[in-house]
Amino acid sequence: MNTHKLLACIFLVSISISGSSSQFTFGDRVTFQGATGPSNPGYRLISRDPRDIKYFLFHRRLDPDAFIELHLGDTSFFNSSTFRRDRPVKFLIHGFNNNGTGTRFPIDTKNAYLENSEHNVIVVDWGKLSTPAVPRRSQADVFYPVVVDNVPMVGENIAKFILFLLDNGMISSLSQVHIIGFSLGAHVSGYAGAYIRQKRQATVSRITGLDPAGPMFSRVPDDGRLDRTDAEFVGRQSGLSLTILDPLECPFSMRRVMNVIHSSRLGLYDDIGHVDFYPNGGRYQFNCIKLSDYDNPFQTFRSFARSLSNAVGSCGHARAPEYFTYSIRQGPEKVLACKCLSWRDYLTACKSTCSDKTTFGEYCPPTARGKYFLEINIRDGDR
């Protein structure tokens, strides 16, 4: 089974489990064999309560480090002059074992947006649902499936928050909304977009996935099949892993854009967006120690989680948000990528003869489509 396929499509309707009549929709829980129940300590140390999902509004009219906490269903902030109803809204969603206030992503990315324009930047902090209450980095493989199990719920909550803004006139259209997710946060972004499409038959303007996490989000097996008519995805229980989504089967004909930046072997490597960027080939990054070249680095989520908990292993993974943040600060048409067949093609021929270039990252035009490569090596002072 090919184990490198990925991410939540922005028009996912439901998930069905192969060999079962059970239909999972966005109100249901998705669970993983061998990962759930009282035998897994993660369910005692990681929150499952959507009330622990926090929304922090940042705006350049405030101190860069100051924020206003927003609450789903609370309209008291509507009269605040801080939220600009006529400006784009950027949602930043962190990943596994992170939070919204103490890690480089989303903080650096938030700062870059505030430096450049009067965006409404909303940092989604789901740290209590993505990190054990008692840090146990050596047991990341125990907690990872529990956090994955929280992903649909977090995505649904974010979607409800976006619709809450829309229904109360805080945004005039979903075209104002851009969701940016890193690692597991990329999958959260996909679920949020999918929920909105299911409920309103409309989509947000853009989703950007920054090195989306691979394990437990692999391609469905050959006996599973997407019905393009109703955008239903089919998964199957297999050991400790439940393959959930196969975006390669998504009909990307809609005008809304999904961009993906691939930067490490910890993330998915296949072309799953309208535009897929592969900086430095998408596997290894400058100044990062290479992970061992497993025959199949995603054989189990265990190897991924252990690598992710190691600073060496996460180096390339963390480059995706760094490159994206860099693109925000550089501006339009400053960081260019070339449309090529592969990294080898880029190095041997395409780079020197490239006739199809596009802006990398934040300012990628909505008309761009395909696979793009670039060489990039940013210094600490540029990040």
Image: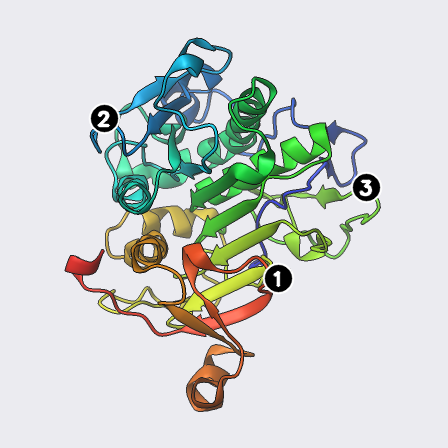
Q: Nearer the viewer, residue 92 or 272?
A: 92
Q: How is the image coloured?
A: rainbow
Vertical relation: 164 (above or below) 89: above
Q: Nearer the viewer, residue 130 or 85?
A: 85
Q: Which mark is residue 304?
A: none
Quarter holding the N terminus is: bottom right
Please name the residue shown 46% across and 10% down the image.
Answer: 74
Whichever of callouts 3 and 2 sits on the residue coming sooner in the sequence is: 2
Separation of marks 3 and 1 at Cα, in angstroms = 24 Å
Separation of marks 3 and 2 at Cα, in angstroms = 44 Å
Quarter holding the C terminus is: bottom left
Q: Which mark is residue 66?
A: 2
Q: Which residue type carries mark 3?
A: Asp
Are the residues at dot 3 and dot 1 in contact (C-beta closer than 8 Å)? no
Q: Local crowd at mark 1 within 10 Å, few (<14), some, or many (≥20)?
A: few
In this view, the residue farthest toward the right is 229
Please name the residue shown 24% across and 27% down the image.
Answer: 62
Q: Which callout, 3 or 2, points to the residue nearer the camera? A: 2
Vertical relation: 80 (above or below) 306: above
Please name the residue shown 38% across and 46% down the image.
Answer: 305
* Kind of element beneath mark 3: loop
Please name the residue shown 46% across and 38% down the image.
Answer: 88
Residue 378 makes an appearance in the image: yes
Residue linked to disc 1: 2
